Each structure stands twice: as C-alpha cells, then as structure tokens.
Image: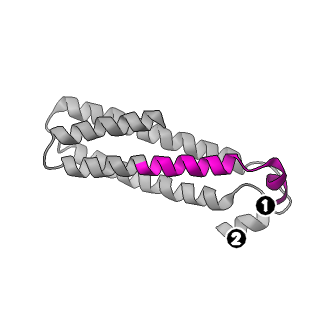
Amino acid sequence: MSQVSNAVQEMIQIAERNSGIGQQIKTIAQAQNQNQIKLEESLGKVQNRSGFVKFFVGPNYGEINNAQKIIEQNREQIQQLNQTMSQIANQSDQQTLTEQIKILEQSNIDIESALRNSEKGFSLLGWAFRLLFK
C-alpha cells in the first residue's frame, strides 16, 4: 500500500509540473489510490474468512470478483497513463512516470496472486457458491 501511495504522490508531482495533460495524470493517480484502498479492503475480507467458513462455503467469491473488477479498472488506467506519457516533454518526468507505472503494475500482480491463492483449497459447497458469483 505504501509503495502505491508513494507512486501516486510522485505522479501527482509530475502532473503539477506538466500543464495540459497534468490533470489527466492527476485524475488517474487519484483513482489508482482509491482503487488500491478498495483492493486492500477486499483482500483483507477474503483473507480473514475463518477456516470453518472456508471449509463449508469456500472463499469469499463476491469479494474476489469485486477485486478482479477493480484490478481490470487499474489496468485500463495504467494503459491510459502509458498513452499520455508520450505527451510529456521532460525526459526525467517520463522516466519517473515509467517507474511509478511499474510499481502500480507490480501491485496489481501481487494482489492477483494473493486472490488466486485464496481461491485454492477444498470446500464442501464452494462449487455452488462459485457458480452463484460468476
């Protein structure tokens, strides 16, 4: 979370130095920060489900699906950032933005991995709940 927060702050600083596309970068950065908070909450709910409940009904498929939707939104926003990066005149700002984008991408990968791990395991009725939430 702190890495994403730092990346967002760096992107906001870049946005302030680059008028024109700066507002677009700032909007995407703030959305990434809000999405990261939502992802952390969803991941916490998924991971904090008790073993007893997991055994009978499986992982929290509703939260997993919500998190996957947010990750997809993040990917789209990162793609927009990559497109706007070419419009930045300052090479240093372009490089910094590239580094921050890599941090955001790695965060998404880490959360996806944690979600996949939480889906593993045996449950008596998990197959039924998986069908309900797909």
Say how the picture is coloured: one colour
Pick out the residue farthest to the top. 92
Amino acid type indicated by mark 1: Gly
Q: Quadrant of residue 59?
A: bottom right
Q: Which mark is residue 85?
A: none
Q: Where is residue 123 in the image (x, y as percent from the top left)?
A: 83, 56
Q: Where is residue 91 in the image (x, y as percent from the top left)?
A: 18, 31
Q: Quick one: SS at disc 1? A: helix
The residue at the point 24 percent across, 43 percent down is 85
CA gap, disc 2 and disc 1: 10 Å
Sequence-first tag of 2 and 1: 1
| Magenta stretch: includes residue 37 | yes
Q: Is residue 65 depicted above or below 50 in this figure? A: below
Magenta highlight range: 34-57
Q: Position of residue 64 (x, y in %)?
A: 62, 56
Q: Quadrant of residue 14?
A: top left
Q: Magenta: predominant secondary structure element?
A: helix
Amino acid type indicated by mark 2: Leu
The residue at the point 30 percent across, 45 percent down is 82
Question: What residue would you read off at disc 2?
Answer: 132
The residue at the point 59 percent across, 60 percent down is 65
Question: What residue would you read off at disc 1?
Answer: 126
Badge 1, how many Cα within 10 Å: few under 14, some, many 20+?
many
Q: Is residue 68 depicted above or below 92 in this figure? A: below
Badge 2, how many Cα within 10 Å: few under 14, some, many 20+?
few
The residue at the point 65 percent across, 51 percent down is 45
Q: Is residue 65 left or right of residue 102?
A: right
Q: Is residue 112 depicted above or below 97 in this figure? A: below
